[in-house]
Every structure is written in C-alpha cells, then in structure tokens.
Image (tube, rainbow, N blue to C red):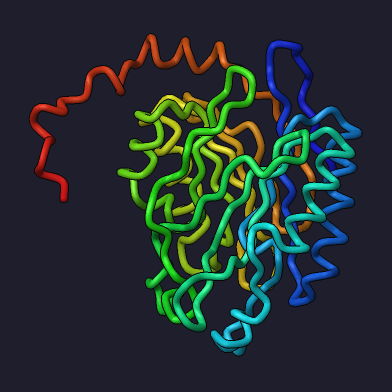
Amino acid sequence: MEILFHRNPIMTRVAIAQIQSSTEKRANLRAARDWIAQARSRGAALIAFPEFLMAFSPASQSAEELAQMAETSDGPFVSSLRETAKAAGIAVLATIYEKAPAANRVYDSAVWIDGQGNLASIYRKLHLYDAFGFKESDKFHPGAEASATIAAGDLRFGLMICYDLRFPELARLLALGGANVLAAPSGWVQGDLKIEHWQTMIKARALENGCYVVAPDQAGNIYIGHSLIVDPLGRTLVELGEKEELAFADLDPRLIAETRDKLPLLKNRRADVYAGKLS
C-alpha cells in the first residue's frame, strides 16, 4: 500500500519505510535497497527506515551473538546502502548494530547517508530501553552525545531513536541546536497502551518544539507498526497500520517558520529559571 501526498516544489518529500526485519542481515539489506529504489521513483528526497533495520534481535539471541553480527560504520552493510543512495540520488536514514568498545555490547546507531552516498552523520542511541521488563543495556552500549544537526535544503534534521522520544530534554536540545525536523527511527514494543504512548509522545515532541516528527517504526515480530509523520501543529500527516508499507509526505519549511512565529515556545522559555535545576 502507498500513501501519497500532493507535491509542492518548495517542500521536501520524505518517505518512511515501515518494515518487518528478519533475523537475516543480508535479506534485510536486499529489502532496504528495494525500498530505496521505490522511494526515489516516487520523488522522495529522503527515505527513513526504522530502528533495527539490520536485523531483528530476538530475546533468545545472546549479547555475544549480536556483537558478532555488528559492523563498523564503514562495513559492508552501510557501504552497500551508500552505493544504493548514490546511484538513486536519495538520502537514506538507516540503522545498524555498530561495534562498540565494551565487550559483547553494540551501539544502536542511526546513520545518515546523503544523496551523493556520503556518510554524513552517525547518532548512537543515548537512552537504552531498560523499562517494561526489557533491559537493552544487557546487549547495547549507550551513546555519549546528541545528534549533530543535518541540513537538507531549508530543513534541519535532528536524530533520536525510539526510547529517546520519552525524554523531552533531548528533543528540546536538538531544537535549540537548530533542528526543525526530528527523525526518530523506532522499534516500539507492543503492550498495554503502547500505541497511545507512541502517538502522544510524537505529537508532544512536535508541538513543544514547533517541528515535524518523522517516526518510522518496525512492524511485526514484537512491534506495533503505526509509523507516523506529524507536522509542527501536531497534525497527523501519515499513520500506517501494522503491515509493511511505504508512505510519503511533503515537509514545508514555511509551516515551521509560521508555527514558531505564532507559537514561540523556544523564545518564551525561562532559561534563567531552569538553569542548573534540571540535572
């Protein structure tokens, strides 16, 4: 199924790929290359994949086994995506298990590949999902710094990953650093009220920062699907179901500017009161 919005030349068209990753890294890479080609053929300047694109890691998989699967950012998985992005002339936001310095731990990393095939940015997930009975810290090593802002025309992207959405401090930090779009590849786990949590967090991050939020999610396995793109006023532009789908939306920098002008939350903050009291 494809959801398509009217294209405006001032806007930037983005695609979100809601996929169900298998445990087979090569199969997931082949599928990703196909999704990239489809997105470009329909005019997208960027395709964003969910968390765990490289592979689904079941609970039965040990930390040692996951570490053996991990690659560096210049390994064959990212290199293949870079070649595909360059050939298609499209930016790609992908996720990998990246080798980490701690023994039998990996980074949960998002990589931004530009339309020339350059590896423009790497963000390593800061907040590990040690909640609701999960303990990602058993397999993952946390990142140490927020995402750099990535320029794409008049848009400035800041990266988050899944559980990061529950921490408004990170989204605000990215917005203050110049981001007007938050991209949050996710593997949001099923459970009571989890769809409602997902929808609420994404809309809140958009509204409080006057920005778009682009949130591709995993489908199937233990995940909810329901990938979302939300505009700066909290309106849902795209919400998918629970199956694999490719969807498109046009992001308008004029709407960001208008929203931030009429609702100047970033300017109205009382940083003089907050300073030193949030740690």
Frontmost residue, 157 versus 262: 157
Q: Position of residue 7 (x, y in %)?
A: 78, 18
* Up-down relation of residue 267 to residue 216 (above or below): above
Q: Residue at x 68, y 17 (%)?
A: 11
Q: Who's the residue at 86% across and 52% down the image?
A: 33
The answer, for residue 178, to whether it is visible in the render is yes
Q: Is residue 267 left or right of residue 195?
A: left
Towards the viewer: 109 or 170:
109
15 left or right, relative to 125: right
Q: Quadrant of residue 249?
A: top right
Quadrant of res 54: bottom right
Label tally: 0
Residue 181: where, in percent of width, then height? 52, 31
Residue 157 image position (x, y, % from top left): 54, 33
Query: In the displayed structure, would residue 272 be above or below residue 25?
Result: above
Please state if 66 lies on the left or on the right of 148 as rendered.
right
Q: Is residue 102 above or below residue 149?
A: below
Decide: is 17 above or below 256: below
Residue 235 seen in this snapshot: no
Left or right, residue 219 beside residue 235: right
Place of residue 22 in the rendered image (x, y in percent of width and height, measured from the top left): 76, 72
What residue appears at the point 46 percent right and 61 percent down from the top-left corner?
193
Nearer the observer, 133 or 169: 169
